[in-house]
Image: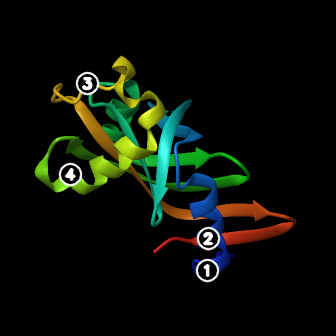
Amino acid sequence: MHDAFPLAAQEILRERFGRDSLIALATLDNGAPCVRTVNALYLDGSFYVITHAQSSKMRQIQLNPAVAVCGDWFTARGTGENLGHILLPENAALADRLRAAFASWYHNGHVCESDPNTVILRLHLRTGVLMNCGTRYDIVFP
């Protein structure tokens, strides 16, 4: 049984993933699981990833938005959502946070903001399990 989103779990998630974090992201491709490592930033119940709109993960999420993530003693299920081009006015504040979090590699040629296919992927978490110092948190995200 999952509990509400405990304050202690919120703090742990912010501490572990509130910066550039490598997480495993799983999607489905014709019913078969696909997993890859992505750079992500955790903010308020979601992970955010900068990616290309025509990547395999985005094509898979478009057909089936169910996703799962895993990293650093945390697993969760949720849905993926394409928030659109990184330079959209509605993405400005989030894009600034992502640029700051990913500063160590952002401008090394990996991200091309002028490409309209450079998008922000939101991984909206629904349920998760977090382990910390022998304590298990079963979480339902708001």
Q: Nearer the viewer, residue 98 or 13?
A: 98
- Quadrant of the rendered structure where residue 49 is? top left
- Classify 10 Å Cα crowding around label 4: few (below 14), some (14-19), many (20 and above): few
Q: Earlier in the sequence, mark 2 or mark 3?
A: 2
Q: Is residue 15 above or below residue 88?
A: below
Residue 51's x, y, as percent?
A: 35, 32
- Which residue matches tag 4? 92
Question: Residue 30, which numbered label?
Answer: none
Q: Nearer the viewer, residue 25 or 19?
A: 19
- Quadrant of the rendered structure where residue 7 is? bottom right
Question: Can you name the residue that lies furthest to the top here?
Answer: 109
- Determine the secondary structure under disc 4: helix
Q: How far separated are the C-alphas under marks 1 and 2?
A: 6 Å
- Which residue matches tag 1? 7
- Classify 10 Å Cα crowding around label 2: few (below 14), some (14-19), many (20 and above): few
Q: How far separated are the C-alphas under marks 2 and 3?
A: 33 Å
- Determine the secondary structure under disc 3: loop
Residue 104's x, y, as percent?
A: 47, 32
Q: Are the residues tagged 1 and 2 within 8 Å (C-beta)?
A: yes
Identified at 69% across, 76% down, the residue is 1
Identified at 48% across, 36% down, the residue is 28
- Which residue matches tag 3? 112
- Which residue matches tag 2? 11
Which three-letter amino acid code belongs to the residue tagged 1?
A: Leu
**Is residue 64 shown to the viewer in this render?**
no
User: Viewer-nearest of labels 3 and 1?
Assistant: 3
Q: Earlier in the sequence, mark 3 or mark 4?
A: 4
- Classify 10 Å Cα crowding around label 1: few (below 14), some (14-19), many (20 and above): few
